[in-house]
Image (cartoon, rainbow, N blue to C red):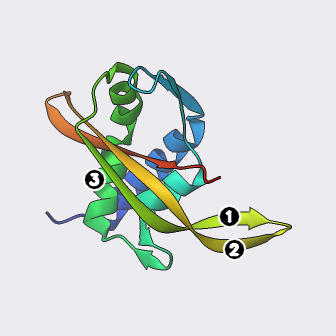
Amino acid sequence: MTLELHDFDEIKRKGEEFYKTLTEIHCPYFNDKIYFNAQGLEHLKFKRHGKARPRQDQYMRFKLIHLAPAILRISKTVQGIQETKSFEKIRVHNRTDMIMKDVEYYEFIAVLEQRRVRVVIKRRLMTS
């Protein structure tokens, strides 16, 4: 797939604008709200800190981001759960630290607008 720079920039701009309008969505699977934060937007653009996703990957994610809220609103089942440990940015006393935390990833898959779309939700587990 070959992309023209103009198309990529326009899709990315529209996708970012749309993502920033999202605040919270009720998900029947969790029977709770899902929040869209800056870390989620960063995930659409970067694989990890300082390592940008390829343009084709970003293009696909931003092109389909409008389907994510609908998928989460209708999802009553989860297709996959992964538990792992990950370094997470934590704000402590006016500084940002990287701390190892337990996290869970939930995978929701649906076919909308004749496209199979996967949405992954990350949940940090609280430690005692």
N-term mark: 1 or 2: 1
- In the image shown, does 99 or 47 lie closer to the viewer? 99
Q: Are marks 3 and 1 in contact (CB under 8 Å)?
A: no
- In the image shown, does 11 or 47 lie closer to the viewer? 47
Q: Position of residue 21 (x, y in %)?
A: 58, 36
Number of other residues with Cα within 10 Å of mark 1, as a class: few under 14, some 14 to 19, many 20 or more? few
Q: Position of residue 55 (x, y in %)?
A: 31, 68
Q: Can residue 16 be seen at all in this image of the molecule?
A: yes
- In the image shown, does 100 or 91 lie closer to the viewer? 100
Q: Secondary structure at mark 1?
A: strand
Quadrant of the image containing the N terminus: bottom left
Residue 125 horizontal side relative to residue 115, left or right:
right
N-term mark: 3 or 1: 3
N-term mark: 2 or 3: 3
Of the residues shown, which amino acid type is indicated by label 2? Asp
Residue at mark 3 to residue at mark 1: CA–CA distance? 29 Å
Q: Are marks 1 and 2 in contact (CB under 8 Å)?
A: yes
Q: Secondary structure at mark 2?
A: strand
| Residue at which label 1 appears | 90
Q: Is residue 46 above or below residue 121?
A: below
| Residue at which label 2 appears | 97
Q: Secondary structure at mark 3?
A: helix
Q: Can residue 4 be seen at all in this image of the molecule?
A: no
- In the image shown, does 126 or 20 lie closer to the viewer? 126
Of the residues shown, which amino acid type is indicated by label 1? Ile
Which residue sits at x=17%, y=66%? 2
Residue at mark 1 to residue at mark 2: CA–CA distance? 5 Å
Residue lying at the far front of the rendered structure: 128
Q: Position of residue 38 (x, y in %)?
A: 59, 53
Residue at mark 2 to residue at mark 3: CA–CA distance? 31 Å
Q: Which mark is residue 60?
A: 3
Q: Are marks 2 and 3 in contact (CB under 8 Å)?
A: no
